[in-house]
Amino acid sequence: MNLTTFETELNKIKKALTKIIKDIEALEYPNPQLKPNVEIHAKAKFKAKLNILIKEEDILKVLPSDWAEKVKKYNEVFIKIGTFIKTDSLKKGFAQTDNSTDKGRTEELLIYNIYETLRANYEKKIKNLNLEMKKSKEFIEKFVKIKQKGHKKNVEWLLVEVTKVLNEFKNAEIEKNKMA
């Protein structure tokens, strides 16, 4: 490799790094207070992956092409949940979730945590409505537990399920008002 070729390759790497860092910074993650040196923001995780890469194509693959869209959809999930449940700790987990699949804050774990927290709170709220036992059970059984690992769910599924849970709770409240 001659000096001109080396300089061309170096410029490609610099451009790729500039682009990918800009894309990482543009991700619309929440910004909760994380414990220093214990909890690592997803943006920092993505940037750390760049430290060992020396090829332009590898650098450009650090951030999956659909990741920004996924982050937007997770934000939609939290907007949809609104005040139905407390979401501070879930948002903290989301802020630490990157595209890792083997350990730590995986997307699979994020989906599990959001869904199961919502489902468990839905169940408590249904019970607090003091509906007839049969009706209460009927509402509760509409949403089943999912496995923590290997559930094969995605953010689109989560968005649909969140909507269903919230709609069913409204239906349960209507049922409660009929009893009054």
Image (tube, rainbow, N blue to C red):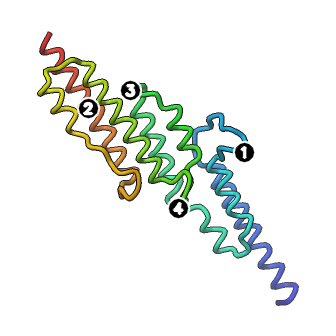
Q: How far is the residue under mark 4 from the one under mark 3?
A: 31 Å
On the image, the x and y values in percent for residue 18 come to: 73, 61
On the image, the x and y values in percent for residue 38 come to: 68, 44
Q: Is mark 4 on a helix, strand or loop?
A: loop
Please tell me which of labels 1 and 2 falls first in the chain. Answer: 1
- The mark lying in front, picked from 4 and 3, is 4
- Relative depth, front residue between 146 and 8: 146
| Amino acid at pointer 3 | Phe
User: Circle 2: is it few (<14), some (14-19), or many (20+) Cα within 10 Å?
Assistant: few
Q: Check the image and name the residue furthest to the top.
A: 180
Q: Are marks 1 and 2 in contact (CB under 8 Å)?
A: no
Marking on residue 84:
3
Q: In this view, does 158 lie to the left or right of 35?
A: left
Residue on which the image places disc 2 = 167
- Relative depth, front residue between 30 and 143: 143
Quadrant of the rendering where the N terminus is positioned: bottom right
Q: Are marks 4 and 3 in contact (CB under 8 Å)?
A: no
| Amino acid at pointer 4 | Asp
Q: Is residue 141 above or below residue 58?
A: above
Q: How far is the residue under mark 4 from the one under mark 2?
A: 34 Å
Q: How far is the residue under mark 3 from the one under mark 2?
A: 11 Å
Choose top left, top right, bottom left or bottom right for residue 79.
top left
Please tell me which of labels 4 and 3 falls first in the chain. Answer: 3
Q: How far is the residue under mark 4 from the one under mark 1?
A: 20 Å
Q: In this view, does 7 lie above or below 87?
A: below
